[in-house]
Image (cartoon, rainbow, N blue to C red):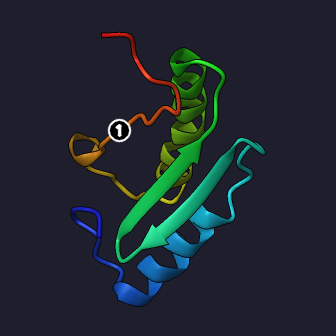
Amino acid sequence: MPTNFCCGQEIWIIWYNSLLKLNFTTRTKAFAFADDLILVNRGKTVREAENFTNFEMSKITSCAKSNKIKLNEEKFKTMFISRTKRKE
């Protein structure tokens, strides 16, 4: 749950569920587990995947701002996974 959230768990759940219904691009899938939100993006390059992730994260932060919810961005984590092997 975000810091300083004072409206109760039920309101948090309603808002959190609305995140899963945001209009993400077709390259993005959103998954929730407890109070964690996972965005999975596809891209042809790491840079492209990074750009998609930043674009989708801006939707989430905008949604939070419009609902007067402050997210702790220091807790955001990013992990890139590639199917291609890197040359050693």
Q: Which residue is mark 1?
A: 78
Look at 28% across and 76% down and name the residue there.
Answer: 6
Left or right placement of residue 76 versus residue 82 in this view: left
Residue 18: image quadrant is bottom right
Look at 48% across and 44% down and name the residue there.
Answer: 61
Left or right placement of residue 6 versus residue 43 in this view: left
The amino acid type of the residue labelled 1 equals Thr
SS for callout 1: loop
Q: Residue 32: where, in percent of width, then height?
A: 48, 69
Look at 52% across and 50% down and name the residue there.
Answer: 39
Look at 46% across and 56% down and name the residue there.
Answer: 38
Q: Quadrant of the N terminus?
A: bottom left
Q: Residues within 10 Å of mark 1 (few under 14, many from 20)?
A: few
Of 88 and 42, which appears nearest the observer? 88
Q: Residue 48: where, in percent of width, then height?
A: 60, 20
Where is 39 relative to 31, above or below? above
Of 10 and 34, which appears nearest the observer? 34
Of 79 and 71, which appears nearest the observer? 79
Q: Quadrant of the C terminus?
A: top left
